[in-house]
Amino acid sequence: MSRIRILVADDHGIIRRGLRLQLEQHEDFEVVGEASDGRQAVKMAETLKPGVILMDIGMPNLNGIEAAAQIVRQNPAAKIVILSMHSDEEFLLRALTAGAKGYLLKESGDADLERAVRAVAQGRSFFSPAIQQTLMEDYLRQLQQRGLRDSYDLLTEREKEVLQLLAEGKSNKDVASILDCSVNTVATHRTHLMQKLDLHGAADIVLYAVRKKIIS
């Protein structure tokens, strides 16, 4: 049985020990290291090459989002789950821009922690259900205040397919292979859907998909 090797980064020893205890209840999970600040997390990620990194945001020396960005620059395939007390859009967008694949509220239960680790280990995204609900409510409130309607229904069926695949972290080349079309065609669909939805980058695509519960 192959094990999922996990690095835990949090500046509170009690939280690190609690996470280790929860994670190691699963036979296929192995905590290979614990970092107490962001700089240490970057160094340990480089030497240990864990399958999944659980990263707190508020850490000394280097915060978790900046540490995540440095880790992803060193290793674009790194799979990072941000641990946070913040459920607002600003922190989630910063985490996604840094390259995180998951965002887990610290108040989440053991089941969400397990699901988050397994999802990102398999190359999928994971976001706390409470975040999805909050983002969707905020999004609908903004639409009402601005007198706008949701633009999702303006997308073609193919654009909706492309949106989901891109939000799942797939490249244009991957999407082209899955949909059996050219990379140029995918790029065109990507441009059109971003214009229709007023999105401005990869992180915006993921954030929109989380709001709409297209990905989980």
Image: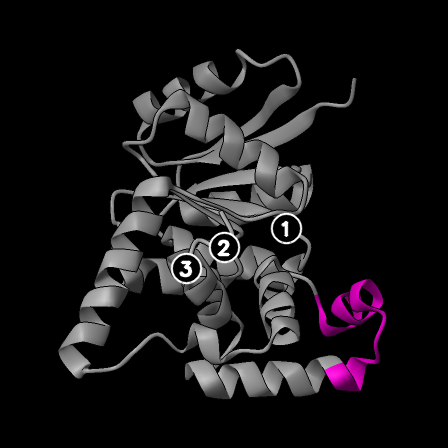
Q: Residue 212 carries which label?
A: 3
Depicted 180 relative to depicted 27: above or below: below
Distance CA(mark 3)–CA(mark 2):
25 Å
x then y, percent, for residue 11: 33, 36
Residue 91 in view of the camera: yes
Distance CA(mark 1)–CA(mark 3):
25 Å
Helix, strand or loop for the magenta stretch, by majority: helix
* Residue at the image position 48 percent from the left and 69 percent from the top: 203
Residue under label 1 = 78
Q: Callout 1: few (<14), some (14-19), or many (20+) C-alpha neighbours within 10 Å?
A: many
* Residue at the image position 49 percent from the left and 63 percent from the top: 206
In this rendering, position of residue 22 left or right of residue 101 = left
- Contact check, label 1 and label 2, Cβ < 8 Å: yes
- Of mark 1 and mark 3, the one earlier in the sequence is 1
- Of mark 3 and mark 2, the one earlier in the sequence is 2
Three-letter code for the amino acid on which mark 1 is drawn:
Ala
Residue under label 2 = 68
Comparing labels 3 and 2, the label whose residue is closer to the camera: 3
Query: Is 62 within the magenta?
Result: no
Look at the numbered disc 3 and give the secondary structure of its residue.
Answer: loop
Depicted 194 relative to depicted 77: above or below: below
Residue 58 in view of the camera: no
Front-most of residues 87 and 212: 212
Three-letter code for the amino acid on which mark 2 is drawn:
Ala
Segment colored magenta = 171-185
Depicted 194 relative to depicted 9: above or below: below
